[in-house]
Amino acid sequence: MIRDDDHTATDLSHLRGGETARNHDARTIAALTANPGCARRGVMDAAAVDKDAVARHLGFGAPFGQSQFAITRGNAFEAQVKADGCAELLALLRDGLGLDIPEVAYDDLESVGTESREVRHTRTRHLMARALESGEGTMFDHPLLRLDIAGQRAYLEPDVIAFQLGGRFHVVEVKSFAVVDGQAEPEQVAAAARQSAVYVLALRELVAGLGHDPERVSHEVFLVCPENFSNRPTATPVDVRPQLAVVRRQLARLTRAEDIARTMPDGLTFALDEGLPDAVRAVEARYAPECMSSCEMALFCRDEARACGATGTLGRPVRDELGGVDSVVTALDLARGVREPSEDMAETAEQLRVAARLRREALASAPAPAVPPRDTASPLVGVPAHGADVLERTA
Ligand code: SF4
């Protein structure tokens, strides 16, 4: 008997052009939540397409993710912190944070089931079940977790430790960016918090699946980083409740893989051949400047969005404020009153006409400048000055 799941797996494999499915990690899952309204990203991620390979084949490869130097440095720091059964980490948690961790059992799951992720995941479940029942087991290194992404099972292979304290599990995230005088780069902390939230979510699902209260996995994670450019680690507790709420909500909003596969044009495939540009363009994108830091396809989509004058190139706030007006040319035509708006655009069109009139009045009453101004107010509500510049050029 052929089940729906089999059809979906076949459809998704066809979308990948027969390539191996790309495994998610917490970084890619956290990034998944960055632009959930983008169908292009949605279908590629649901089918586990290697977006980096696609972008490179299209001639828009981008240096994405960590540099080799950062990866090497991160691995060395992590190895140092975890050496000798996490001795340095334990000292840090005991002395630095004053946590009462009486005795330690350390389980490293990395060597378990190297041939099969399912075996390693089963071992993770087994150890967690024992720890939940008996309180035995303090530290788990490299647990293999699972999370449902758009209806598809994704394995997470975190370089992370879950440790048990007072009957609750905490995630420890080891990062190689520096904490200088108690401060770290806010963007890096935010990204680490989002990734940790993904781990917390996956651990909670595992704990719930074992019949225990998912709240036994704490929302408080410990971020371990080098201190003041040295290799000395420092630990900081981080409350990831806001990130948890966002990740949970966005994952729930991701369209299920089988639904996406069903809506794609017949025979669509992202195989790395001459048909790839057309295949990619066949799926609608919602480019925004934020894509540059969260999606491998960003250079291709930015080029495409600029070529068609998409409002998304001016930033997500502008696009959202313009409602269903996707093109800068349409926005300008509506503002000038030379295009009749459809019913659903009537309100936006009215706001654009008012903004354009106010702009004209402001310019008319302003004293003549010595030099023609380049950064004048925008005819669009909420468009920054540089956006107005783009609008003028696009028009
Ligand atoms: S870069 Fe392109 S595919 Fe990726 S999220 Fe942005 S618009 Fe979507």
Image (cartoon, rainbow, N blue to C red):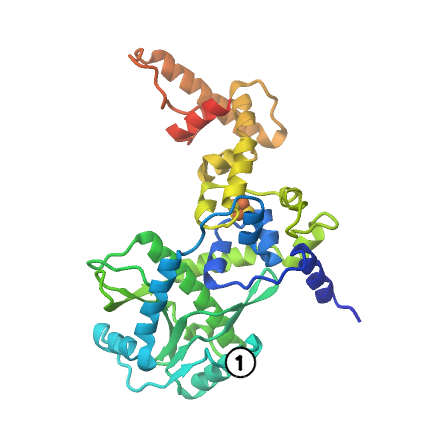
Which residue appears at 63% of the width and 51% of the height?
272
Q: Which residue lies most toward the right here?
A: 1
Q: Is 187 left, or right, of 306 in this rendering?
A: left
Residue 310, compared with residue 89, is above or below; it is above
Evaluate whether residue 175 shows in this view.
no
Q: Is 292 left, or right, of 236 in this rendering?
A: right
Q: Amino acid at mark 1?
A: Gly
Q: Residues within 10 Å of mark 1 (few under 14, many from 20)?
A: some
Mark 1 lies on residue: 113
Evaluate whether residue 93 shows in this view.
yes
Query: Where is residue 245, by image quadrant?
Result: bottom left
Q: Which quarter shows the N terminus?
A: bottom right
Q: How many marks?
A: 1
Q: Nearer the viewer, residue 99 or 313?
A: 313
Q: Nearer the viewer, residue 116 or 189?
A: 116
* Location of residue 5 in the rendering, given as x and y in whole percent from the top left corner: 70, 66
Q: Which residue lies most toward the left here?
A: 181
Q: Nearer the viewer, residue 352 or 389?
A: 389
Residue 130, compared with residue 196, is above or below; it is below
Query: Where is residue 178, by image quadrant?
Result: bottom left
Residue 29, compared with residue 139, is above or below; it is above
* Location of residue 239 in the rendering, given as x and y in whole percent from the top left corner: 34, 63
* Location of residue 324 in the rendering, given as x and y in whole percent from the top left corner: 57, 35
